[in-house]
Amino acid sequence: MTRALILAAFVTPLLLSAPAHAQIAPARLPTAPSTWDQHRYQADQHRYEMDRLRQQNEQRQATARQLELQTRQNQLDLQNRRTVDPYVPSAPPALRSPEEERAARQAAGERRETTSQRVGEIDAWLDRRPN
């Protein structure tokens, strides 16, 4: 008797659950889209991708323009920060009298002679015969 009760306890829910399954509509698999829908879907994908690429290109161009403006502004700032030496006209050579010019030429000639004598002494010492 206990066997019958245990069996009835297990079998009854199984029998009662069968009508519940019978009331659920069977799952329908989606039908394959028509060729027309496939092409339309593919065209939509291409359009979306082209829009995305166009927007990406516009963003890059905007960034490039912004960087170009910043670069130009930085260059102008650097040029404005430079200190410009004031223009100082060169002074014309001082005019000397003919006597001063003659004295300067004679002094330069004496310096050349003195330098050549010293160089001559060094050359003579270098040209000497070894012992």
Image: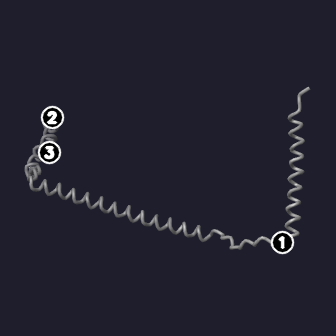
Circle 3 residues within 10 Å: few <14, some 14–19, many ≥20: few
Choose mark 2 or mark 3, whichever is in front: 3
The residue pinned by badge 2 equals: 3
**In front: 124, or 39?**
124
At x 89% / y 60%, what residue is drawn? 107
Q: Is residue 24 above or below residue 68?
A: above
Q: How many marks?
A: 3
Location of the N terminus (image quadrant): top left
Q: Which residue bears the numbered disc 3? A: 13
| Residue toward you, 62 or 83 | 83
Residue type at numbered disc 1: Arg
In this view of the protein, which residue sits in the foreground, 65 or 32? 65
Residue bearing mark 1:
96
Q: Is residue 71 left or right of residue 108?
A: left
The three-letter amino acid code for the residue at tag 2 is Arg
- Quadrant in the picture for the C terminus: top right
